[in-house]
Image (cartoon, grey):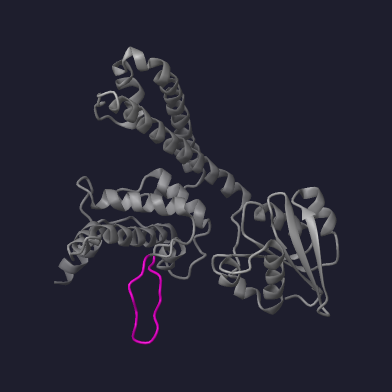
Amino acid sequence: MANDTIETIGCDLGDKVSVVHVLASDGKAQRHRVKTNATAVREFFTRPRAHVVIEVGAHSRWVSELLKELGHQVTVANPRRVKLISQSDSKSDSQDAELLARLGRADAALLAPVKHRGRAAQADLAVAKSRDVLVRTRTKWINHVRGVLKSFGMRLPKCVAENFHKSTRVLVPTELKPALEPLYEMLERLHEQIQGLDQVIEKELAQKYPDVAAISQPSGVGVLTALVFLLTLENKERFDKSRMAGAFLGLRPRKGQSGDDDPQLRITKAGDPFVRRLLVTSANYILGPFGKDSDLRRWGLELAKRGGKNAKKRAKVAVARKLAVLMHRLWVTGEVYQPLGYQHKRQAAA
């Protein structure tokens, strides 16, 4: 911590009101309540330089930017990694603010600091996330239409979601048109909105970030997945080794080793769930019937053969983890991806 920092301030950011715990250099403490808006935050924190600790959340981005603008040292804590806060049996806003201040005074590394991505990257990532919301909404509405018709003894034919509103609209009986016609109109508008965002992603954003071409080389990895992966990590130099990418995205197993006991646990699910879901979807395609032959596919299929009712699920997650490592490696090196490069090396060595 800088020598000119005389106070440590813990701030539990609320949606409307935030609780602030000011810990002076002599140990004296003060507690305040500040409205969570730019004017109130600026007014309260217009004070001598301090070390301000906040939790990551909906307001943490703009608050941290404002505090840095005012000259403060800012630490954004990851509450998931700080069990003293996330699993406290006496959790409250004031208690959290005090804990943030005291942990920040002791050692900021205990808070597992989080670094926010840049505003431009966040805005571009919002395009992909908005598309995801529209796609999930379309799926929900299609399932509702199918369920309503099924209750009347009708089963709609299989079709891709993009053509559902065109191919099944004429099959709706007259008695159900008042109930389902508004949904079909909205499905048609949703399809147009999704197409518009697809154009933005594939033409504008893919050109804005040329590294997307290198990241999307493996079969099963589309422009959307590559773009979200790039924007989530933002900086390809943030990891010393590409293997750290899988752990960063929550695809590595948890560890609970104690003595000779080392149980097999589920993955951590840390990081952004959106990019993790896209990676698992790509892994599902790679291992599926339409996946192209590659070292990754062969490795995943062999892993799925090891037996057990969850073997296939574990294989998909494992392939997703290796895929994240591969994508980061292609991003760093920019080399041409060889799907069977490992097999070719083995044959040449033999």
Question: Which residue reaches farthest top?
Answer: 174
Q: Residue at x 35, y 29 (%)?
A: 162
> Percent from the top left, x then y, of residue 337?
31, 55
The image shows a total of numbered marks equal to 0
Q: Residue at x 27, y 60 (%)?
A: 315
- Per the rendered image, the range of residues in magenta is 252-266
Q: Quarter-wise, where is residue 313 in the image?
A: bottom left
Q: Residue at x 46, y 33 (%)?
A: 199
- Residue 180, placed above or below residue 6: above
User: Which one is in front, 120 or 277?
Assistant: 277
The quarter of the picture where the N terminus appears is bottom right
> Percent from the top left, x then y, of residue 88?
59, 69
Say if the magenta span includes residue 168. Answer: no
Residue 291 visible somewhere in the drawing: yes
Is the magenta region chiefly helix, strand or loop? loop
Question: Which residue reaches farthest bottom?
Answer: 259
- Residue 215, placed above or below residue 172: below
> Percent from the top left, x then y, of residue 231?
51, 51
Say if the magenta span includes residue 261. Answer: yes
> Percent from the top left, x then y, of residue 152?
29, 23
Residue 211 visible somewhere in the drawing: no
Q: Residue at x 42, y 36 (%)?
A: 135
